[in-house]
Image (cartoon, helix red, strand yellow):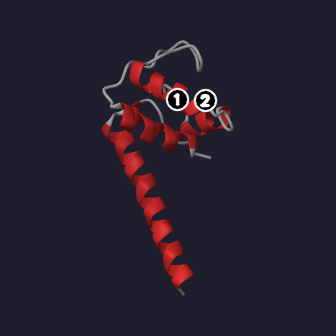
Amino acid sequence: MYKLIATGFVFIAYASSALANEELAQKKNCLVCHSVSNKIVGPAYQDVAKKYAGDKKAEAMLVKKVIAGGSGVWGQTPMPPNNITEAEAHTLVRWILAQK
């Protein structure tokens, strides 16, 4: 019984965390150019997760790119710098890399 309750709490915490990260992406206007499953202006987050799966340096590199902007990896359309803290960028990048 306790295991079931603990599992439920973990699931609720995970679901809340995933939702909160999507809300952060919305708040920071990331979803204007990106979506989880479809390319808009920038790549779909699922495509980003696939590209960097298993790359231990991906989070740090993507955090820098989210903060400073960049271009060339997914085409010539640049991603502008974002008004985001480093902690927020880490939260978003972890969420993006978890999309499958």
Secondary element at tag 1: helix
- Per the image, the residue denoted by label 2 is 57
User: Which is more toward the observer, 55 or 36?
Assistant: 55
Q: Residue at x 47, y 22 (%)?
A: 65
Q: Nearer the viewer, residue 68 or 56?
A: 56
Q: Position of residue 60 (x, y in %)?
A: 52, 29
Residue 88 as seen in the image, left or right of residue 5: left
Residue displayed at 59% across by 40% down: 46
Answer above or below: position of 10 versus 41. Answer: below
Residue 73, label in figure:
none
Asked where in the image residue 3 lies, by quadrant, the reply is bottom right
Residue shown at 61%/38% (left/top)? 49
Residue 4, image x, y percentages: 54, 80
Q: What residue would you read off at disc 1?
A: 60
Q: Which amino acid is tagged 2?
A: Lys
* Mark 1–mark 2 distance (CA, rounded to whole Å): 6 Å
Q: Amino acid at mark 1?
A: Ala
Which residue is rendered at x = 45% and y = 67% of the image?
12
Decide which of 85, 12 is in the foreground and name it: 85
Q: Residues within 10 Å of mark 1 (few under 14, many from 20)?
A: few
Circles 1 and 2: CB atoms closer than 8 Å: yes
Q: How many marks?
A: 2
Q: Residues within 10 Å of mark 2 (few under 14, many from 20)?
A: few
